[in-house]
Structures are given as structure tokens and as C-alpha cells.
Amino acid sequence: MKKKISIILILLLSILLGIFLYFHCPKTIEKEPLQEIIPVVEKEETVNYEEIINNLKNTYNNPEIIAVIRIPNVLEEAIAQTSDNDYYLHYDLYKNQNIVGASFLDYRNKIREDKKLLIYGHSDPEGQLPFVKLTNYNKKEFLKENPYIYLLDKDGERKYEVFSSYIETSDFDYVNLNSFNGLSYKEHLEKLKKKSFVSTKVSLEEDSRVLILQTCSFDSRIQAKTKYQIVVAKEI
């Protein structure tokens, strides 16, 4: 009797073990062909630039945000525009009073109409604010590695190539939009190019569209009470 019971128990254990192995052991699965696993993308996705700007307006609860400036691996900043060039020196994108302010487009500019666009932003001696990185354009290697600046607004993204980077202490006609102290527009651009600490081969024409970035300079080698880092780039 004991022998029969032992045999039955062994059979039951074998059956249970078989059931366990069936449901728990990995099974060999034949791979599907690669082209069926990864879908073929026939064309690039369309970027909804207006949605990007609207999302920023919602994020900051600020309808005055109109653009984004970016230098790949260097900076990416939302840009606002209001009725003067003073407000965003003292207020951030949330419209809270803030000593670091925000980056902004000149109040006189029409972003899609003007040949010359001016964007301003704060710097700091400690190197914490994004626009302080513009001072690196005074070095040949940095300009060579980061020649392009992109400006995105609701209608698309424009690409600019840097052709001048310098520190200005007294000649501020770069902020003029229509009159250039007797110079033609092209001559004015050539003048800005000659001021550059690093020479470039970017050609300039009478109809060239340019982007000018301005921030404070803290370069101790230049003795002046007022000094600005200027970066000028041509749309390509």
C-alpha cells in the first residue's frame, strides 16, 4: 500500500512540475523581419511653430512672448517684446520684478518685416546668465564651432551665420534701424564686420537680413564705464 501511495505521489509531482515548466519557462520566438518592427518614415514631421510659441505663452502666462533664440549646445531662450526697451530689463518672463530681467526684441522691430533685428539680454560677472556666453564669440575656435544662430517665431525658424563679434564702448549706431550716419545699409554692415575680433568670410549685400545680439560686457581688459558685447549674424 505504501509503495502504491509513493508511486501516485511521484506521478502527481511530475504532472505538477510539467505544468509549472510549461507556463513559466521562456519559449523560443522567431523574430519578425526588421522592416515590419520599425515603421518606415516617408517624410519629416511638420513642426508646428505657432504651437511652440503658444505653449511658451501659456507656460509663462505672458502673451508678449514672440520668439525663441537658440544656439545649439550653447543657449536657448524665449524672447519677449513689449512697448519699450526698459520693462524686460527689470522683469522676467513671468512679469515678476527680477534683477536678471528677460531676453527681448527691440520694441521698434517687426519680426518678419525688418531687415535688422535687435535682441537684448542681461549678462553677469559670475557667468550665470545665458547671454554671457556670447562673449565666447570673441574667440576664433568658438565661432568656428558655433557659427549659426536660430530664431524661431510662430511662422517658422530662420538661420543666421555670425560674421562679427566685438565689444562696443562708444559707437552705438548699430541700434539704428533706418539711418546710419550717412552710410548705406551695406556700408553700415561692413563697418560692423570690420569691428569684429575674429574675421569671417561672410559676404554682405544691401538686402542682407541681420540679427544683432547685445549684452553687457565685463571684460576687464577694456577700460570703459559702458561696454557691450555685440554679436552680429546674417540670415542665410
Image: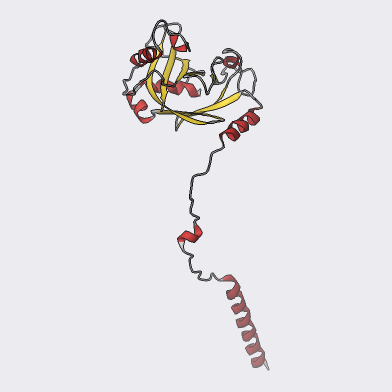
- Which residue is pictured at 52% across the width and 21% down the height? 113
User: How many numbered discs sit on the rendered protein?
Assistant: 0
Residue 165 lies in quadrant: top left
Q: In this view of the protein, can residue 77 be seen by the observer?
A: no
- Residue 5: x and y in percent read 67, 89
- Residue 215: x and y in percent read 47, 16
- Which residue is pictured at 63% across the width and 79% down the height? 16
Q: In this view, does 41 lie above or below 73?
A: below
- Of the pair 109 and 142, the residue shown nearer to us: 109
Most extreme residue toward the front, as rendered? 207
Q: Quadrant of the N terminus?
A: bottom right
Residue 131 placement, left or right of 154: left
Q: In this view, does 35 lie above or below 125?
A: below
- Residue 213: x and y in percent read 46, 19
Q: In this view of the protein, can residue 155 be seen by the observer?
A: yes
- Of the pair 58 and 9, the residue shown nearer to us: 58
Q: In which quarter of the image is the C terminus?
A: top left
- Residue 78: x and y in percent read 55, 27
- Of the pair 1 and 230, the residue shown nearer to us: 230
Residue 53 lies in quadrant: top right
Residue 139 placement, left or right of 230: left
